[in-house]
Image: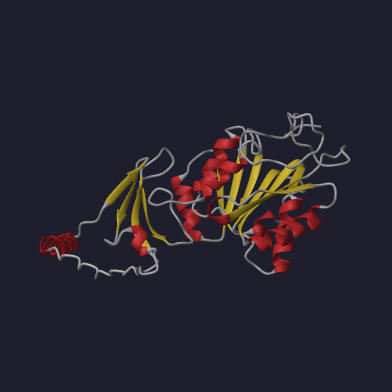
Amino acid sequence: MRSRAHHRAPSARPVSLSGQEDRRRARRQQLLRRRIQRLIADALDVIGYRRTVVVDGVRYRERTRDPLRRALSRVGSGVKEYDVRFPATARRKRTTMRIRCTNERRYADVGPTRRPTLYDALEGRIRPGMRVFELGCSTGAGSTRLSTMVGPSGGVVSVDTDRESVRFARLRYLEPQLAFEIGGVETLTGELDGAFDAAIAMDALGGDEDTTKATLAELWRVVGPSGWLFVLERVRPDEVDRLGGQLRELCGPRAEVHASPPLADATVLLAAQRPTADEPGAQAWEDDSDDDTDSGPEFGPERGPRPGSGPGSP
C-alpha cells in the first residue's frame, strides 16, 4: 500500500493591528521629543545661554550648543570652542582665554584624552627626584601626571609647538616642578649630554625617516646613565619592528630596547635604557622567578629596575 504525503500550506501570520499602532505612537512621540528639544535649544541660543563646566575652579563656557562628541565626529565641524576663566592666584590676576578643542588638541577637563592613561604605563620607571623632558606635551594633562610621579624633588620640562596648548597648560597646571615651553626638539640645543634622567616623545615622530632618526638621536643624547628614553607612537603592527630597529641602531648594542604590547588606542610603547658608565651592558630587570632568562620588561607599576639603577646611583 502506497503512503500518500500530505502537504499543508503554511498558515499566514496574523497581522497585529495593535502592534502597528503602538509603533506609530512610539514614532510620533520620538519625533515630538526631538522637536521639543530643538525648540528648547533654539530658545537657549536666542537668550545666549551656554552650558558651563567648572573643574578645580577653572570655568569652561561653551560657545556653541553642539555636544563635544558630535562636534568632533565626522558629521560635525571638527572644532568645539570654549571661553575659559582661570581663578586668580598669588602670582596672577584672574585670566581668561578662548580654546579650540579638536581631535588633535584635547582638553582633559571637558573631554576624554588618552595621554594620562598611557603615561600610567611609565609608573615605576619615572620615580621621585627624576628630571624628565617631554616632547609633544599637548595641553598638559599628561605632564601633570609626570609631575606627580617625580614629586617636588624632581622636575618636568614639557615642550610643544602649538602655542594655544602651551598657553593653556601654563595657566591650568601650576605645579612648581612643572615647566612648559613653546618649541620642539630644537629646544634641547645647549643642554648638556645626559642632562635628564628620562626623555619622552609621544606622537612626536610624524616626520620622514631622517627627521625621526634626528629626533631620537637628540633625545638619546640628553638621557643620562641608567636613564630612559620612552617613545609612544600610534603605529600599525607592521611598523613596530621598523621603529624598534631604528631605536636599537641609535642606542647601540649596550642599551636594552623593549616594546610593549599595544596600549590604549593602538599606541605602542618602546623603551630604551642607557647603561651606567661602569657596566658592560644595560640594567637588568627584577625577576622573582628562578629562571635566568630575561624576557624583557612588563610596563606598569608592578615591576621596576633593580636597586641602584636610579638617578644618583654610581
Please state the horizontal and vertical placement of residue 119, each as a whole percent of the image.
57, 45
Q: Quadrant of residue 71?
A: bottom left
Please say if 20 is above or below 97: below
Apparent side of residue 203 relative to residue 295 in the rendered image (left or right): left
Apparent side of residue 159 relative to residue 25 in the rendered image (left or right): right
At a point 56% along the width and 41% down the height, the residue shown is 120
Please say if 83 is above or below 88: below
Please state the horizontal and vertical placement of residue 30, each as a whole percent of the image.
17, 61
Please state the horizontal and vertical placement of residue 83, each as a whole percent of the image.
33, 56
Q: How many marks are shown on the rendered structure?
A: 0
Say which of 304 and 10 sits in front. 10
At a point 61% along the width and 57% down the height, the residue shown is 233
Residue 177 at least partly seen: no
Q: Quadrant of the N terminus?
A: bottom left
Residue 89 at least partly seen: yes
At a point 40% along the width and 48% down the height, the residue shown is 109
Please say if 152 is above or below 247: above
Please state the horizontal and vertical placement of residue 145, each as a whole percent of the image.
53, 41
Q: Quadrant of the C terminus?
A: top right
Say which of 112 and 314 sits in front. 112
Q: How is the image coloured?
A: secondary structure
Residue furthest out toward the front: 1
At a point 24% along the width and 68% down the height, the residue shown is 10
